[in-house]
Amino acid sequence: MFVVHDRMALAVGELTMNKEKLVVQKNQISDYEKEILLLRKQQEGLENEKEKDRKKIGELREALTRAREVKIIVCS
């Protein structure tokens, strides 16, 4: 009888520890998911900035080309 009781007590103890580990792991997963969401938002913001920069560089190149054309015409 004592052996069964001891085994039962060990099993209950292990179950309690496993439940506690599970709670910790669920919290870790939740934290990781939040971090992933923040990183995705940062990436989206950086992609938007990158696109704006590409457009601005294109506009500046066009302006530089026009300025060079004007300089060539004026100097000729």
Image (tube, rainbow, N blue to C red):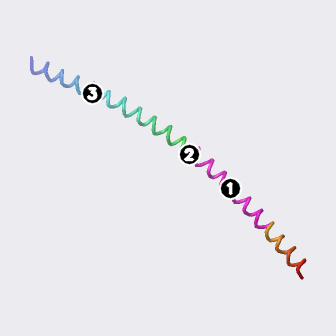
Q: Nearer the viewer, mark 3 or mark 2?
A: 2
Kind of residue indicated by mark 2? Arg
Q: Earlier in the sequence, mark 3 or mark 1?
A: 3
Question: In this rendering, would 27 be left or right of 48?
Answer: left
Q: What residue do we see at 76% from left, 67% from top? A: 61
Q: Residue furthest top?
A: 1
Residue 76 found in image quarter: bottom right
Q: Are marks 2 and 1 in contact (CB under 8 Å)?
A: no
Residue at image x 73%, y 59%? Answer: 55
State the separation of the CA atoms marked 2 and 1. 16 Å
Question: Left of 64 or right of it: where is 48?
Answer: left
Where residue 51 is drawn, which disc sits there?
1
Question: What residue would you read off at disc 3?
Answer: 17
Q: Which residue is mark 2?
A: 40
Task: Report if residue 24 lies within the magenta region.
Answer: no
**Towards the viewer: 49 or 18:** 49
Magenta range is 41-62
Q: Is residue 48 magenta?
A: yes
Counting every numbered tag in the picture gives 3
